[in-house]
Image (spheres, helix red, strand yellow):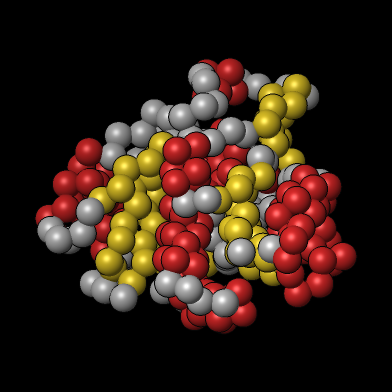
Amino acid sequence: MITIVTDTSVGYSRAEAESRNIRLVSLAYLISGIPYSEQPRGENGNFAEKMRGKHLKTSQPAPFAFSRIFEELTQNGGEVLCITLSSALSGTYSSAVKAAEPFGKSVRVINSGTVNGGLHLLVDEAVNMLVGGLTLEEICNNLEGIKSKIGTVFTVESLEPLKKGGRLVASKSANTTLNTRPILTLVDSIQFVSNVRGIKPRIDALVSAVPDSARRIFLMKSEGADTTRVESALSARFPHVKIHLRTVGPVLTVHVGEGAIGISYIGR
């Protein structure tokens, strides 16, 4: 039996994870030095309110958080496919790889190169292949090709959270002065695309970054963002694609701040 393991940045609710037989490993965040464990979507309380004006940090899981699950799942010949958020954003992938070493080929760890909606899309593809009866090796090989079809574009109200966490490449080019906001992409790491001035150009830039081949789309936001107009623009451009709405959890909010909007997609 193959079981999929991922981290809580995937944004699954508990019901979604259980329906897919997926095990979640919690990421951690600190508010003014007080540690919290990220829970499945909808179970993190009023974290945004607690975060305002406080010193914030995130923390990767220790290898033990993965190894105890790997040990449980590999008993009696079980196999594990572990898919983590991008290694460029967190040491979670490294922790999982270290934890997997004693288990040999029974545990495979995949660096998704993405997070949240993008990670959700990739894990769902793995679930579909698992249901289809593919072997662990076959699923891993296929996921490497699927990763190139997944993309994320987003914008933030402030660059400070990304700068503090060291997650933004070429940050000198991006700015949030006056009514200007940056357009950023995530493919393994965060990259600056352009600066746009005004709400409509910002929406247009986000929506136009989604390729015509998109077959599933996630529209994500952090606390305080209004995605109504972005959703309308996406629905108009992709009338036959369901737009999944998602409010991101505390760990991602630490790095993008309030008011952030993002779109993740997978192409055909």
Q: Quadrant of the C terminus?
A: bottom left
Residue 126 visible in image:
yes
Q: Is residue 223 above or below residue 108?
A: above
Residue 191 visible in image:
no
Foreground pick, 168 / 151: 151
Q: Residue at (82%, 66%) from the top-left corner?
A: 103
Foreground pick, 263 / 85: 85
Q: Tell me residue 130's x, y (percent).
A: 49, 67
Q: Tell me residue 12's x, y (percent).
A: 48, 44
Residue 92 falls left or right of residue 229? right
Q: Is residue 17 above or below residue 150?
A: above
Q: Tell me residue 251's x, y (percent).
A: 60, 38
Foreground pick, 234 / 197: 234
Q: Is residue 118 above or below residue 32?
A: below
Residue 243 falls left or right of residue 115? left
Q: Quadrant of the N terminus?
A: bottom right
Residue at the far right: name it.
Answer: 102
Q: Is residue 107 above or below residue 184?
A: below
Q: Tell me residue 249's x, y (percent).
A: 52, 36
Residue at the far front: name it.
Answer: 76
Residue 266: quarter of image: bottom left
Q: Residue at (62%, 54%) from the top-left corner?
A: 5
Q: Residue at (31%, 57%) from the top-left corner?
A: 217
Q: Residue at (60%, 74%) from the top-left corner?
A: 136
